[in-house]
Image: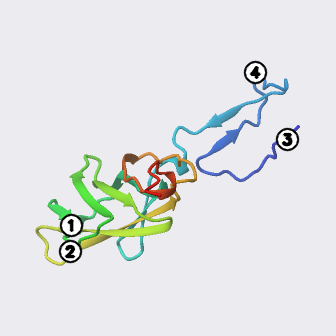
Amino acid sequence: MATARKSSAVKAGGVHFSEEPAATTGASGTPSHVHFDEKLHDSVVMVIPQPDGNFMVKVGFLKTQHKYEIVFTLPEVPALGKDVCPAPVPNPHIRITDINHVPEGGLRVTCEYMAHQEGVLCEEVVLVSETQEHVSVGVKIHARVMDSHHGTPMLLEGVRCVGVELEYDSEQSDWQGFD
């Protein structure tokens, strides 16, 4: 039988085990009382401000050859002003499809991302002010992309699969050619 070790340190987010006996019992007949936080820290897209004023956005595990819609909210950046648009920097793997101001403050950014290869990937987009010349904010999207043959990742809140780009695999083809 496994026993839980009590710790005096408290972590934000995660699973909490009650210090007090509970009225419910587990399958073994021992008291069991587990609380899951409503939003686990690891289940949402994380936006991390960088010292240089730019942002890093961690989107979790994705799968190669899949296209994703990624939605995240950046904190308010007063220097950008009200009129913000994506910089015209071509990137074949990621593009911003929508930018909206949210009532609570900040910018809700929606982008499409094609996970094109396996590994830890970093793609950058830039938001620019339409009214303030030379004002911009860089956003680096970090993803851990797994091979398409190794299962399906659980997507974070804010990430949604919107398509699959099929790979041609000659070994799986029914066509045998001419003998």
**Left or right of 45 on screen, residue 77:** left
The answer to whether marks 3 and 1 mark residues whose Cβ atoms lie closer than 8 Å is no
Q: CA distance from mark 2 to mark 1?
A: 6 Å
The answer to whether marks 2 and 1 mark residues whose Cβ atoms lie closer than 8 Å is yes
Disc 3: CA contacts within 10 A as few (<14), some (14-19) or many (>=20): few
The amino acid type of the residue labelled 2 equals Val
Residue 45 position (above or below residue 125) = above
The amino acid type of the residue labelled 1 equals Leu
Which of disc 1 and disc 2 is earlier in sequence?
1
Q: Which residue is mark 3?
A: 3
Q: CA distance from mark 3 to mark 1?
A: 53 Å
Of residues 166 and 145, the one nearer the viewer is 166
Q: Which residue is mark 2?
A: 135
Across and down, in percent, residue 69 comes to: 34, 50
Q: Which residue is mark 1?
A: 80
Q: Secondary structure at mark 1?
A: helix
The answer to whether marks 3 and 4 mark residues whose Cβ atoms lie closer than 8 Å is no
Which of disc 1 and disc 4 is earlier in sequence?
4
The residue lying at 42 percent from left, 69 percent from top is 122
Q: Secondary structure at mark 3?
A: loop
Q: Secondary structure at mark 2?
A: loop
Q: CA distance from mark 3 to mark 2?
A: 56 Å
Residue occupying the far top of the picture: 23
The residue lying at 58 percent from left, 53 percent from top is 150
Q: Which residue is mark 4?
A: 23
Q: Nearer the viewer, mark 3 or mark 1?
A: 3
